Amino acid sequence: MSKNKVSSGTQRWPTLAQFPMPAKALVSIVILTMAIAMSGALGQIIVHDIIPTFFSGQPTEKHLDKSENSDQHASKESDLNSSGRGDLFSEESVQALTPKDKPLYQTEQSVWTLKWTHIHLFGINMIFIFMGAITLFLNFSIKTRTWLVILPFIGVLVDISAVWLKGYISPAFFWLHIPGGGLFGIVFAIVAVRAFWEMYRT
């Protein structure tokens, strides 16, 4: 008898197709807003990580301000050369460049990484809290919905871990951004497309 109650309770769980139009409008706006946020994050990844890592060449003199004196010119050229071609191809980890006389928590790298971590953990996780709530009402099996709720948070943790690992162990951990970001990006696309299809299919 208890099984019948569970079964009937599951059947009463609403789906997006059954939502009234105001609720569908709210879900649509949430998805579109989160999609804009994800697009901004993708743009930052392309500009900050992918382009410097794979496409930036050595600076040429024409890119430097000719009005600078020789000291400024040498300093700027040194800064540009030391930046290398992004995280993956840098010659040494950031940890090796930090002063040894400072505690770890006082180094610029540590402070920057802590700021980056907590901002992204709040921001990206908030996206998938909203998307997870939408996922609950998709017309999928309970098992599928459960995985669609959990997987993005695993991807976020992998992506955040890559920042610490590439900074303090090896730049090669740059590659962890691909499975981490790919995981929550793919789940976002699946939930968004499925939600719009269920709500507005004719």
Image: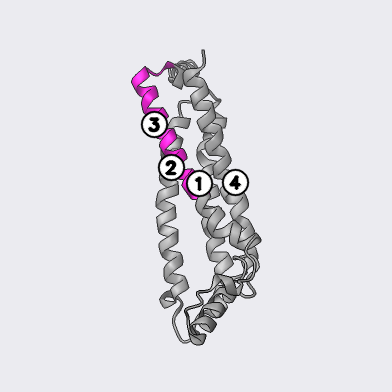
Q: Residues within 10 Å of mark 1 (few under 14, many from 20)?
A: some
Specify whether 119 is left or right of 57: left
Which mark is first along the chain, 2 or 1?
A: 2
Q: Which mark is residue 54?
A: none
How far apart marks 3 and 4 lie (CA) works out to 23 Å
Contact? badges 1 and 2 (CB < 8 Å): no
| Residue 64 on image: x %, y % | 53, 73
Q: Is residue 22 above or below residue 86?
A: above
The residue wearing badge 4 is 182
Q: Residues within 10 Å of mark 2 (few under 14, many from 20)?
A: some
Contact? badges 1 and 3 (CB < 8 Å): no
The residue wearing badge 3 is 29
Which mark is first along the chain, 2 or 3?
A: 3
Q: Amino acid at mark 2?
A: Ile
Q: Is residue 193 or residue 15 the one in the foreground?
A: 193
The residue wearing badge 2 is 127
Q: Amino acid at mark 1?
A: Phe
Q: Is residue 40 magenta?
A: yes
| Residue 5 on image: x %, y % | 45, 17
How far apart marks 1 and 2 lie (CA) works out to 10 Å
Q: Which mark is residue 153?
A: 1
Q: Amino acid at mark 4?
A: Gly
Q: Residue at x 65, y 65 (%)?
A: 172
Contact? badges 3 and 2 (CB < 8 Å): no
Q: Is residue 61 above or below residue 172?
A: below
- Is label 3 or label 4 in front? 3
Q: What segment is highlighted magenta in the picture?
A: 18-42
| Residue 160 on image: x %, y % | 51, 57
